[in-house]
Image (cartoon, coloured by chain):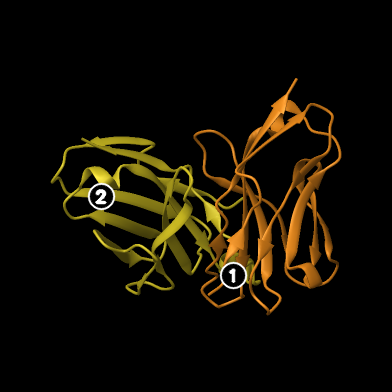
């Protein structure tokens, strides 16, 4: 069965530093890949997605992610962290079924230190 | 913009009560989902529906049931609430819908934080 791992349940970065949140998936078939963000007491919001085409995907709020098939990875990065980036981040994968079911990773909580 | 609304943000119920959580989406999406979110466990799929009156079990359906009588509305039912069902419940929808294009991603409501005492 498909599984998603996110290295590090908590990540702390200084304001202005690089943000790197790691995501790996298990499927041998290239899936569709998503990053969602959840701010406190809110639902999940899509940051970016990879379905086909260019493997470097740019999303909202300055985030981007690169799909590396050989590494089964889809890490999320942002060059310069802002205080407003503090949130929970979820990686998710889908095999593109008609029902759009996705498997979510356990999440990484990002803290930004002033 | 896609809008997914949930009937309550916070809910407190007693053990044994029957609980209804309502979810409505306005994008004519075919697929709707109910998840629960618990610290350290991420999101776990309870049930999903791909059409009116159709439902499929997710990973943790025990203790829950669902109803989808209209395309825009998906209800989660706790027949007899228990303390271990205290959690954040998230509804989501997806599908070509009004956009008529494969979208793949799910759109989430704000969540209902349910406490069972």
Instruction: Please indicate whether residue B39 sits to the left or right of residue B95 in the image.
Output: left
Q: Which mark is residue B96?
A: 1
Cβ atoms under marks 1 and 2 closer than 8 Å? no
Q: Quadrant of residue B53?
A: bottom left
Q: Viewer-proximal residue, B83 or B92?
A: B83
Mark 1 surroundings: few (<14), some (14-19) or many (≥20) residues within 10 A: some
Label 1: element kind: loop
Q: Residue at x 52, y 44 (%)?
A: A43
Residue B30 in the image: above or below residue A106: below
Q: Which residue corresponds to the image point at 25% horizontal and 55% vertical from the top-left?
A: B77
Residue B92 appears in the picture as rendered: yes
Q: Which one of the lettered chains is coloured orange?
A: A
Q: Residue at x 75, y 20 (%)?
A: A114
Secondary structure under the numbered disc 2 in the rendered image? strand
How far across and how far down the image is residue B50, in percent?
Answer: 44, 72
Residue at the disc numbered 2: B20
| Residue at x 84% of width, y 29% of height | A16
Q: Quadrant of residue B113?
A: top left
Q: Colour of chain B?
A: yellow
């Amino acid at each position: 069965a498909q599984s998603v791992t996110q290295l590090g349940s908590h990540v702390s970065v200084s304001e202005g530093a690089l943000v790197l949140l790691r995501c790996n998936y298990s499927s041998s078939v290239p899936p569709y890949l998503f990053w969602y963000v959840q701010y406190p007491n809110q639902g999940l919001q899509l940051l970016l997605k990879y379905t086909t085409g260019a493997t470097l995907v740019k999303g909202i709020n300055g985030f981007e992610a690169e799909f590396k098939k050989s590494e089964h990875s889809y890490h999320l990065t942002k060059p310069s962290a802002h205080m407003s980036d503090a949130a929970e981040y979820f990686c998710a994968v889908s095999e593109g079924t008609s029902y759009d079911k996705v498997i979510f990773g356990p999440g990484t909580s990002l803290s930004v230190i002033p | 913009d896609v809008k997914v609304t949930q009937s309550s943000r916070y809910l407190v119920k007693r053990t044994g009560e029957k609980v209804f959580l309502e979810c409505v989406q306005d994008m004519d999406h075919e697929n709707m989902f109910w998840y629960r979110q618990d610290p350290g466990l991420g999101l776990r799929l309870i049930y999903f529906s791909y059409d009116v009156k159709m439902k499929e079990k997710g990973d943790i359906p025990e203790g829950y049931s669902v109803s989808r009588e209209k395309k825009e509305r998906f209800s989660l039912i706790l027949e007899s609430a228990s303390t271990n069902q205290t959690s954040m419940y998230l509804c989501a929808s997806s599908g070509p819908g009004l956009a008529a294009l494969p979208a793949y991603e799910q759109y989430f409501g704000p969540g209902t934080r349910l406490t069972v005492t």
